[in-house]
Amino acid sequence: MTAPKLELRSAYKRFGTNTIVHGLNLSVAVGETLCLIGESGCGKSVSMKLAAALLPPTSGEVLWDGERVDDLSAAEFRRRRMKFGYLFQGAALFDSMTVFENVAFGPRQLHAADGPALAALVAARIREVGLPEHVMHRKPAGLSGGQRKRVGLARALALDPDVMLYDEPTTGLDPVMSDVINELILRVAASRDDDPRPDRPPVTSIVVTHDMHTVRRVADRVVMLRPAPNLAPHESQVLFDGRVEDLFVSDDPAVGPFVRGEAGEKLRELAA
Amino acid sequence: MHRNSRSRAAGASADSRFRLKFRVRVAPQFCYVAVVSTGSPSAVPNAPFAGAASGLTEPVRWLGAALLNVTRDVGGLTTFAFAVAFSLLRARPSKRVLLPCLYEIGVRSIPVVLITGGFIGMVLAVQSYDQLAMMHLQNRLGAVVNVSLVKELGPVLAAVMLAGRVGSRTAAELGTMRVTEQIDAVKALGADPIGHLVVPRVAACVLLIPLLTVLADACGMFGGWLFSVKLLGIPDFHYWHHTLNFITAYDFASGLVKSLAFGASIGVIACHRGFHSGAGAEGVGAAATESFVLSFMAILCLDFLLGVVLGRLYWILWPAPMTLM
């Protein structure tokens, strides 16, 4: 049996006295697209950063391809570093650099390409996300929200990643642009499906989102989290873990209203 | 809480006052343990004078918390400085990242350093002239102005300008990068944030502050000469003759050594504050302010320590005394 691409085992993350991730067990299979949903502040983005080893867990284990990575030395970690693509919520483009330099950043760091090869790679990625090539010489401040997200995606794809992580990819975008991003997520996920080379496994994706349309379109599996602060020590933070079809017919009183966007119980809590 | 417990104690009966005195004088450690170990005075059932004890322990608790914070900050800054040093040893920053930092930190600081340097030279001449004239030593004005500039004011002035102009900007820039997840993005793209963002900035500060110091010294000397010779009428020959008699290569070198230490501290403090900035505009603003305040304090502390050490070293190497006469 193939080991999960990414795995969290009994992971906890605390910031000061505030627990954000509470004993979370989460695994993502190779080639799977997992959507992480849940109310704001429930620890979705932090869980994804833990899985990508961008944050160290307070306790618990982080595994990549079945091997523990949270206890590695910095040098060993750099050597083992998996190729990640990360699309941040606000795109997190480097303001002081042009679009070209943003997209070229990853390949330059890993010495993956240089000179004309790098220019060709960047141009290909820019075209792939549907942007005109002339935006390459502009600074991020001169781009619209949708363009920034697409540049962020081009930058994440520039390293030809095995794992793609999307943090609220459609937040703040109009419905048409949201659909464009959803389509790009699907394309990236399917980009290696017919590639027989063993060093190019199918792309594994985690999508943190509040957008149920995105969940319907891109998810193979959905995990819903609940906020950690109110949980008893033995309680699981995972409210739902299953297929998309099951999510939308769930009769769990915490899952159904969230998925349908019904505020009933919350409004009663606010009134009280 | 302190004030409340005081007023409560003032209103207590004589008997209570006696008991309070006994409690505080005879067994203060008991009160402290009871209050601190339970977290709050109200948590001690029927604990007599718990409020008064809390009032007495509050300053200790405050002092302890302040000391812990300072220790944590100094420890964090030291660890950060070591991480920067190790990163610098592991890999030199690439030209692509270093050159913009050199331009921003060095080239764009030149005008402000030149202007302030020129004025401080003139101010020194204004302030020193009357004192020296009272002793009929005004011809030695060049020595006073220029020794002060080369040993103290040039390096300190250049460092303060750098802390204000570059340190605050760096802290705000890195703070904004942290808030907008750009530092996480650097990490996600396979780069070391310390090596990519901090090392070039610290290196640029260390490399360029000696040059800024030389410019500040030169402009200050020019300003001092202009005011002393052209306006106060001190003979040109005496001005430069005494200057050359009193300024040694050691003075100049000690100024540059100081400036290197100032540059490193400004770079590390600014980057540390930016890297650990709080959330939002308030956090970034606070990081910029803290960067300047801490850098300024570090400059003055280092100036004092290096002044003592380098001064002592001078007397060991060249024991002959010097006088203005």
Image (cartoon, rainbow, N blue to C red):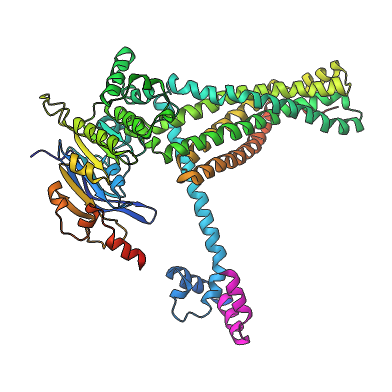
Residue at 28% x, 23% y is A125
Residue at 41% x, 30% y is A94
Residue B75: x %, y % from top left: 47, 45
On screen, B64 above or below A127? below
Residue A63: x %, y % from top left: 21, 41
Q: Is residue B178 part of the magenta span, yes or no?
A: no
Residue B161, quarter of picture: top right
Residue at 39% x, 27% y is B90
Q: Is residue A134 left or right of residue A159?
A: right
Q: In the depicted view, which residue is nearer to us: A138 or B233?
A: A138
Residue B300: x %, y % from top left: 64, 39
Residue at 64% x, 36% y is B303
Q: Is residue A107 left or right of residue B83?
A: left
- The answer to whether residue B253 is visible is no
Q: Quadrant of the N terminus of chain A?
A: top left
Residues drawn in magenta: B1-24
On screen, A178 above or below A96? below
Residue A44: x %, y % from top left: 28, 47
Q: Is residue B4 part of the magenta span, yes or no?
A: yes
Q: In the depicted view, which residue is nearer to us: A64 or A39?
A: A39
Q: In the depicted view, which residue is nearer to us: A267 or B152?
A: A267
Residue A176, quarter of picture: top left
